[in-house]
Amino acid sequence: MKKSAKVWLVGFIMIFILSNIVFAQSITVTPKEIDGKTYVDIDSLKDFLNFDYTKTQNSLIIQKKDLSISEVIDKINKSVVAIIGDSKKIKADDFYYSKIPAGLSHGSGVVIDKNGLILTNNHVVEDLKQPYVIFYDAKAYKAAVLYSDKEIDLAILKVNRSNLTPIEIENPKNIYVGQEVLAIGTPLFLGWRNSVTKGIISGLNRPVDEVYTFLQTDASINPGNSGGPLVNMQGKLVGINTLGIDYWQGINFAIPAENILYFLDHYKKFGRIKRCYLGLEFEDSWLSYVGLPSNLGLKIIDVKADSPLKGFAQENDILVTIDSYPINSIAEYNQTLMKYLPGDKVKIKIKRNGKILEKEVILKEWPTSK
């Protein structure tokens, strides 16, 4: 990095006072006095005061990291869509849907490519006879489902529209508990398109369905929000809103950016998810099942005939680690296998009768018939 730029401390104090920003914490910096003015290293302030800067020949361009709620909405509003279609399962004369023509069903989605690619939940589109995408300007387009995966609950749609505004996906390493987020989508009724709710990331790596882990948020997610974006205060996608817990408030879940990137990367490279396969079935410990921390490992209850661990692993063995990754739940096991491709070598540690056994195996691809 080039020599750090210097900035007048008093100028910063005035900027942030005028912005009504109050800091409950403090940092210690080493100032320099030059011609009666106090200067400090700008790099020692940028993280504390939550800004970035770009140095030009004669000046500094200072940008705040977090935007206001209205600024975030303005930034991503054109990226959020509604998805609607006739449901294959809902009958027009069903009691709940008796006033909805032809059994219409809807959800939300988000633009991920300027040339018409839309990301949403699999469960939003899997039962639609023909999905349509409605954009911020109320224009509707017929959509084709390019690929969907039920396990990870994501789908990619394509519409014949270009020059769209794709959303930026956040680096998973920058997502943390307590981070402020906005959920945007079409809850309950199409007339409420692009409704916004605000909350925080309440928890990471929540094993909701024993398949993959989710982000937990207290931002309101209602029927119709599914498939819409959960964004941070920089307008970056941190999750795809997926489900809320009936009869409870403030407990909602989104598919995390890590899983979204995995899904999109595999689709781009292979046209589908290439899942790794060890041919094992497991039973979660009761600690894992009720959500308590556990280091018990994962109990193996069956070893399939086509398992690469056949002849090594046995029923009632405990899977301890895959390479250096500890495995204590089924969701954790699946999340760990996302880091690999079929054909990769991994080191498996299991525990049997108190003894640790180790074997290097080549991961298979998940059989299509499974």
Image: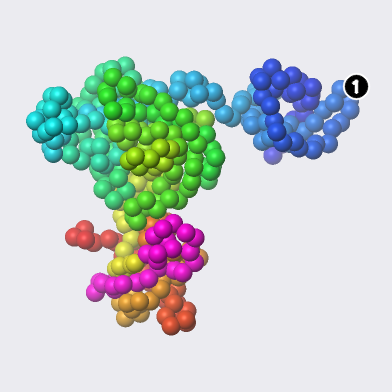
Taking the spot 49% from the left edge, 42% from the top edge, the residue there is 202
Towards the viewer: 176 or 293: 293
- Callout 1: helix, strand or loop? loop
Residue 75 part of the magenta segment: no
Residue 333 visible in the snapshot: no
Q: Is residue 310 above or below residue 97?
A: below
The range drawn in magenta is 284-308
Residue 182 visible in the snapshot: yes
| Three-letter code for the amino acid on which mark 1 is drawn | Gly
Residue 307 part of the magenta segment: yes
Towards the viewer: 2 or 263: 263
Taking the spot 13% from the left edge, 27% from the top edge, the residue there is 98
Q: Residue 232, position in %: x, y?
A: 49, 33
Q: Residue 144, position in %: x, y?
A: 20, 34
**Image colouring:** rainbow
Image quarter in which the C terminus is found: bottom left
Q: Which residue is mark 1?
A: 36
Q: Residue 194, position in %: x, y?
A: 36, 23
Most extreme residue toward the right is 36
Taking the spot 43% from the left edge, 38% from the top edge, the residue there is 250
